[in-house]
Image: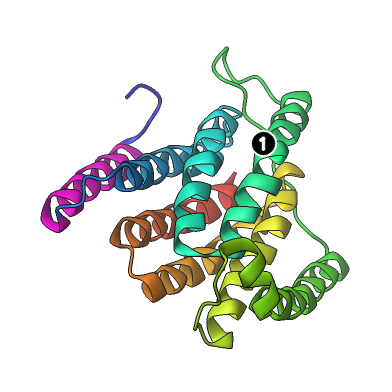
Amino acid sequence: MKGFNRFEKGLIAANIAIGAVLMFVIGDYSWLAWVGLIASISNTFCSILVAKRKISNYAWGTVTVLAYGVVAFAAGNTGEWSLNWLYYFPMNLVGWLMWKRKKVELQGTEAEVESKKLSLFQSIIVYGGTAVCILGFAHLISLPAVNQWFYGATYSFGFDKYVIDSFTTTSSIVAMILMIKRYREQWVLWILIDIMSIILWCYTFDLMMILMWATLLVNAVYGYIRWRVK
């Protein structure tokens, strides 16, 4: 794979190999399992390209949000599928346009972008506002009427599950904005989002999704390091 270093190639290969083994061991070859595998692989490519500040991450991101949204809907994770279909999907186009305008050409290769850093005041506003929104959205999606409206049934999840679902959704909205605006602090949120997403998918115990978010967690740490040193 041209343009990827050994670590990046290893991360992609591990994701594909483990995903294939999981399908074989579990014995689930349903269409939903294949969609989950596609979401996992495309998300790995997308996150690595974000870490490399490559504009092409948005193409892989579009595939990811469509596929992952299907899996999240099937699992009853309201915040996750609504985030991907209603927010990430249009924001991929917005992000591509904004990155393209700010690109810096490097030796004739694919465009990269420069990163920025939040001020202390901006950090307080971003993180404080995110915390308030997390609690508010968790209460909303935990309401029986909301679950009945979307799924025709009421799930027996505890409120902690809805807080985690809300955390991943709300924080992802903020992280996506920081990503589009090229702020390096996005990676702090992505790391926390990946950890919470692993916990979230443990509730419905989807090994393919747990694998995907574990891979993304590794890459988020990698992305944080790359955006700080360059």
Q: Amino acid at mark 1?
A: Asn
Q: Residue at x 28, y 47 (%)?
A: 15
**Which SS class for mark 1?**
helix
In-front residue for pair 32/125: 32
In-front residue for pair 26/124: 26
Q: Residue furthest front?
A: 152
Instruction: Judge whether residue 188 can be spotted in this image.
Output: no
User: In the picture shown, does residue 196 fall above or below 178?
Assistant: below
User: In the picture shown, does residue 138 fall above or below 93?
Assistant: below
Q: Residue at x 79, y 59 (%)?
A: 118
Residue 39 falls in image quadrant:
top left
Q: How many marks?
A: 1
- Provide the residue span drawn in magenta: 6-26
User: In the picture shown, does residue 86 fall above or below 161?
Assistant: above
- Local packing at callout 1 (Cα closer than 10 Å; few below 14, some 14-19, many 20+) is many
User: In the picture shown, does residue 151 fall above or below 163?
Assistant: above
In-front residue for pair 130/149: 149
